Amino acid sequence: MPAGATFVQADVRSPAARELLARGGFTLLNHHAAQMDVRRSVADPLFRCDVNVLGFLNLLEGARLGHVRRVVFASSGGTVYGESARLPVAESAPKLPASPYGTAKLASEYYLATFSQLYGLETVALRYSNVYGPRQNPHGEAGVVAIFAHRVLAGQPLTVFGDGAQTRDMVFVQDVVRRTWPRAVSRSRRWTDRRARLQHRYGVETSVNDLAPRSSPSRVADWRSSTRRSAPASCGGTRWPSTRQRTDSGGAARSAWRRVCERTLQSFKEG
């Protein structure tokens, strides 16, 4: 943690979190906290709404009372569109989330727009693609890179759910940070409309079948023997979008893939 920073542990739904924003003299709320398990959102949509929608609204109210200037929100680059969108997906494509997770993200974007219109907040919704990298949790509803890295280091085969043809637009976490920070601190005139929705992605499709041998070339045989069918809710591809805001060029994403995978694996080795 940076010197001079104070860490406060609080539930996003709590009065304490709201009061912190209301009385703390902050200029920016950068909101990435969430209950992230898509499958749990399907099994328990009330809990998902309580944490991800009402929790966020609680913080927005604190930001309003505390005269926070800007709110940056981590939305989703795939789940807000649903499964029926045509590829590549434009930012303006119709929104029809297929899970309560996506519905909560989209509802939060609308709350941002409402608070901007009513109270003058500058708001940014960043629709991240599939982010991966060091320190990612390999358990629960984790990203496929983290899961594969964990299994490689544990000497376990790589299991592919479904037919493995589902695609992801994999974005390295360092690139996401590099592109997110300017949106948080910029004082450009582009903020005069107070609202922005931006995609963070490479625009390069990577199937799970492609990802497995790239993650561990020596374990391809194990990977192929471990393929099995999964429930529909676990399959399907993330809809990689056509967008005005790319995190990097597709060529750069391809050339850097092995290097960042090695960095991610090394982070797991180091604990």
Image (cartoon, rainbow, N blue to C red):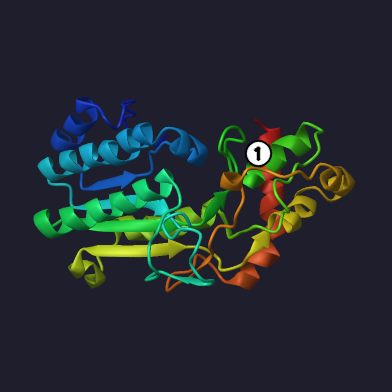
- Residue named by callout 1: 267
Q: Quadrant of residue 198?
A: bottom left
In the depicted structure, whether residue 8 falls above or below residue 103: above
How many numbered markers are drawn?
1
Q: Is residue 3 visible?
A: no
Quadrant location of the N terminus in the rendered image:
top left
Residue 116 placement, left or right of 150: left
Residue 264: x, y in percent? 66, 45
User: Going 61% across and 67% down the picture, which residue do you hit?
Assistant: 204
Q: Quadrant of residue 172?
A: bottom right
User: Going 67% across and 36% down the picture, which residue do you hit?
Assistant: 268
User: Going 31% across and 26% down the picture, which residue do you hit?
Assistant: 10
Q: Secondary structure at mark 1?
A: helix
Within 10 Å of disc 1 (Cα), the crowding (few <14, some 14-19, many 20+) is: some
In the depicted structure, whether residue 194 falls above or below residue 221: below
**In the rendered structure, which amino acid carries the disc numbered 1?**
Ser
Residue 142 placement, left or right of 51: right
